[in-house]
Amino acid sequence: MTDMQYELKSARFLAEDVLRRVIRPGDAVIDATMGNGHDTLMLCEAVGPAGHVYAFDIQPQAVAAAKARLEENGMLDRASLFCTGHQEMDAYVPVQVRAVVFNLGWLPGGDHTVTTRWETTRQAVEKALSLLLPMGVLVICAYPGHAEGDRERAELGALLSGLSNRKYNVLHQHFLNASPGAPECFVIQKLN
Ligand SMILES: C[S@@+](CC[C@H](N)C(=O)[O-])C[C@H]1O[C@@H](n2cnc3c(N)ncnc32)[C@H](O)[C@@H]1O
């Protein structure tokens, strides 16, 4: 995001914009879907040398790709990379965090049958909410347009709609004139 002019581009753009505004140097944050490590690297930059990123993926090839990306950029010491499902995050993250990011779906360039699934996504989202600091954010990019993605988007909408508005602000962004299946972003801010 180096453009001087603010341009609404995509769910990913909004996700990164929110994360960069909320995360402060020294923060602990979670990347719940490490993939090729693009978000992990962005989070490492945002937390700075005194911060820490806890990142999860179930695929060894994803962890290897993310590790290589962080190494190339001199950021590996700012992250703990776990080849573990994000539904186990509470066992690996010992502190409350400023932000959690999920980028649902499959690994770009990988096996499309290995995708996030609602049963485990739901557990992980609930754990992420309990790990958030007050005024911290949970940011989720969802990808409708395939069966599991449609299910995740619908179930997420239902789960998040039921959160108390005394405890959370919940935003659902989607471009009304987008092509079918375009990614959508959910932003949940914990108030207290
Ligand atoms: C869209 S990709 C993430 C892309 C990544 N954010 C990036 O910047 O490159 C989704 C990832 O979620 C991973 N995944 C699927 N189920 C998971 C689970 N239960 N826990 C953690 N990661 C999971 C997949 O292996 C895949 O790499």
Image (cartoon, rainbow, N blue to C red):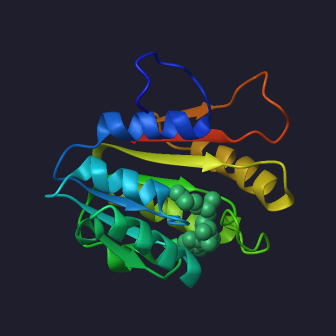
Residue furthest to the top? 5
Q: Residue at x 58, y 45 (%)?
A: 160
How many numbered dots are placed on residues in this image? Answer: 0
The quarter of the rendered structure image containing the N terminus is top left
Quadrant of the image where one finds ligand 1? bottom right
User: Is 81 situated above or below 138?
Assistant: below
Nearer to the camera, 82 or 110: 110
Q: Does residue 99 appear in this view?
A: no
Q: Residue at x 21, y 53 (%)?
A: 27
Q: Where is residue 79 in the image (x, y as percent from the top left)?
A: 30, 69
User: Is 123 situated above or below 21?
Assistant: below
Q: Position of residue 107 (x, y in %)?
A: 65, 66
Nearer to the camera, 164 or 74: 74
Q: Does residue 114 appear in this view?
A: yes
Q: Position of residue 129 (x, y in %)?
A: 42, 55
Is 169 on the left or on the right of 10, as rendered? left
Q: Where is residue 10 in the image (x, y as percent from the top left)?
A: 62, 33
Is 162 on the left or on the right of 180, as rendered? left
Quarter holding residue 189: top left
The quarter of the rendered structure image containing the C terminus is top left
Quarter holding residue 24: top left
Quarter holding residue 62: bottom right
Q: Residue at x 29, y 70 (%)?
A: 76
Is 134 on the left or on the right of 154, as rendered? left
Q: Which residue is drawn at 19% across and 58% down?
A: 51
Residue furthest to the front? 72
Is 88 on the left or on the right of 8, as rendered? left
